[in-house]
Amino acid sequence: MEQVRQWHLLTSGEVVNLLNADSKNGLSRQEVLKRRLKFGENKLTPKKGESRFLIFLKQFHQPLVYILLFAALGVGFLEEWVEMSVIISVVLINAIIGFIQEVKALKAIQALAKELTANTTVIREGKKTSIKVKDIVIGDIVVLHSGDRVPADLRIITSKELKIDESALTGESLSTDKKNIALEEETIINDRKNSAFASTLVTYGYGLGVVTNIGDKTEIGQINHLIASADILATPLTKKIAHFSKILLWIILSLAALTITAGLLRGQPLENVLLEGVALAVGAIPEGLPAVVTITLAIGVSRMAQKKAIIRKLPAVETLGSTTVICSDKTGTLTQNEMTVQKIYTNNEDIDVEGTGYVPNGRFSCKGQYITNDYSVALTETLKAGLLCNNASLFKKEGYWCIEGDPTEGALITSATKGGFIIDEMNTFFPRLDEIPFESEHQYMATLHKGNATNIMYLKGAVEKIVSACVNVLDNNGNTTTIYYEQIIKAVERYASDGLRVLAFAKKEIAKNRTSITHADTTEQLTFLGLQAMIDPPRAEAVHAVNICHQAGIDVKMITGDHIVTATAIADKLGLRKHNPKETGITGKELDLLNIHQLREIAKKKSVFARVSPHQKLNLVQALQDEGHIVAMTGDGVNDAPALRQANIGIAMGIVGTEVAKETADMILTDDNFATIKSATEEGRNVFDNLLKFITWTIPTNLTEGMVILVASLLGLTLPITPLQILWINMSTAIFLGATLAVEKSEIGLMKRPPRDPKKPLLTAAMFARILWVSTYLVAAIYLVFYYETTHGMGINVSRTICVNLIVFGELFYLFNSRSLHHSPFKLGFFSNKWLIGGVMIMISLQLLLTYAPFMNTLFGTTPIDSKAWGLIIGISTILFLLVELEKFIRNKLK
Ligand code: ATP
């Protein structure tokens, strides 16, 4: 059995034989183990990412760092070695922090990607089994359904309208039809219609294939076309900040030039003025900013992952904070997706079904009377249709009844088993000849089974779809009578208004010589068998989450493929229509009749959209965006991809979602739960808040330092702090104080605020004003203290030491203010951010070292200071703290 071979030139039978495979039953367990040992796992050798060294070097590739390096060169030129080494240390320390953070963030994101390892369905030992893609071996029989990613290279054995998007491999964007045909000549990959290739996506239909190559031996493995993860850490915000840094660079350079010119005009020595220029540049640069942005985003990503929302595209972290509308699926996201059939309707009678969950025990009753073994033909056929036209399986695992596959189908197996049917027996008596798989687009599924006189097609699906194609009804004795549409629709509404999901069942005889069916067979001449209505209770946590979203000014819309009455009943249980209880839902059909302006209006107003097809989902997203909304949209099917791509945040379901949906999405919910979207949105808002907190904290520091130097050089005053001391302040405070804001928990009332308008600038006028007055306060305090100390007999070094401590302690106190943009830190719990308290402790120790350790005194020109000086420092810092709190208080009152 060799791995690489011209498999497409052989017939499927030859391939199966050569690979010692079995197209019906698949491989045995022993055979799988043997093959895994021989050929290894089905994995591609990962392409080497950016080297660590390159990531480290990239830390220096920032405009603000260029200035620092330039400054280091400048002071080196002046032979100011201490200054030079301190500037270089600042650059190095920053680079190391940036490097560690970036590697950590990348690792975290890669680990998340690994967590999402895909599953695939294979036939082994005669049973369909879901396994990890890496566990596939050569000779496995793979079942392909629309939405799947092809797990390895396959030779197609059977197919039904199978279409595969091979753009990942060939660049061809149109899907290719795949069939079990013989290819006579050598063909290029694009034309190998009888083969499917690893990493390509099934966009339609289904099929079976035998694995011919795995891992690096697959076509994709050979060209090593792994999706590059470049730019993984870039978001609109980081780009905005990069842009902001560039502008800042020019401003700082101009101010530095101004300082130097002013100094020179006053006749100061070149060496001094150059040093001042450097000090200004170094002081005004917010060195910590890029690192803190990365840290904050990375913390956001990992917090979201803890809450079961996996971010695939980093910008989503930010966009989540601005989301104004969440469009959610119903089934499984807002509801539990644990279905149990509670009502059956046959022969124009209601039948109650006992039992909960998937446990197949429970009796049937009609008009209060239990139905004994003597089931009517109509009931038998309805249950049989549900069982045969079904791809799920029901089994007992560790004492619990579980299903594999679609919960709707699981519920139907349970109800049929309650009725005494045994699935394996039925499949033997009525072997399946063909299938039209369920696609949300068509809203039904059909299967063809071998019968005695004729073959039989069973159908199940949305009521409107099935009933409209029925011409008669099966009665209790097995005779057909004229169809009574009105009664059927009444029964549907009766069930749906209780929130039950209703499926209709039908059958049709098909000539014995036909072994396949097409969509045309399903549109006419059907015999109606009955309805089965299943409960799918809303998730309790979704009710709460919807309420929180409403409070947060986020509109929640249910966009579902289900019946409008069911959808509306569930919407009411979830409190979706609370603000407008009289509002009626709208169906996809009605949406199609609207012009673009009406669609925008309706999209904005309504909250229940039923029987919506994937293309209507796309139109709805666009309409909402046209109205200025930031839209988060969920999806799971292959056809949801365009809507997910269009939405500002495409959200795929981790459990039931197809690979196509997951790949397009910006975020994946590992628990498929609406409440997780709410939590992620909350975290998104928090990330933004924390960034703002850092910015409003760090800019006054830089502004103060820059202004102190600028004022001194413009007015010809003695510098109250030396360039070296400025470097010390910048380096230590950004690391030990500022960065700790990144782990702040969410603010009180975070989800009571309206969403952030992404078009608005980062800083509001209020924040801007705070930055300005805090900086002015500090500059004024520094000059006053410096003036007072120097004129009251204190040496210049003592006065400067006091000023250095004044800036650091001012920042330290202001850090507590900055923990919340709107509230008092006491409200948050003063010690609730342990990192911050630790950072403050370290910072105080460092300041004591700077002030009292002789080697630091020598290095930085500091001197020990007395308790009176400390009193002054703490006093001024406390006043700053109180003033900021007063400002917040007044602003809150004015609001
Ligand atoms: P949501 O869009 O909220 O997830 P949904 O599951 O009802 O809701 P679809 O999966 O698009 O949406 O299903 C649409 C309709 O098709 C359902 O209301 C049901 O009538 C029918 N249907 C669902 N699953 C099946 C199935 N496995 N076989 C046949 N018909 C189905």
Image (tube, rainbow, N blue to C red):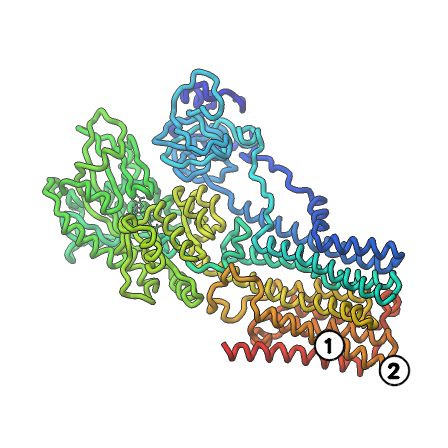
- Residue visible at 77% across and 60% down? 257
Left or right: 638, with 817 as reference point? left
Label 2 Cα crowd, 10 Å radius (few <14 / some 14-19 / many 20+)? few
- 331 and 250: which is toward the camera: 250
Q: Position of residue 227 (x, y in %)?
A: 56, 39
> Residue 793, which numbered label?
2
Q: CA distance from mark 2 to mark 1?
A: 20 Å
> Residue 780, which numbered label?
1
- Residue visible at 45% across and 42% down? 659
- Residue visible at 77% across and 79% down? 784
Residue at the outermost front position:
265
Q: Amino acid at mark 2?
A: Gly
Compared with 849, 505 (above or below) is: above
Q: Amino acid at mark 1?
A: Ala
Residue 849, quarter of picture: bottom right
Left or right: 579, with 222 as reference point? left
The CB of the residue at mark 2 lies under 8 Å from ligand 1: no
Secondary structure of the residue carrying tag 1 is: helix
- Residue visible at 54% across and 31% down? 220
Left or right: 150, with 574 as reference point? right
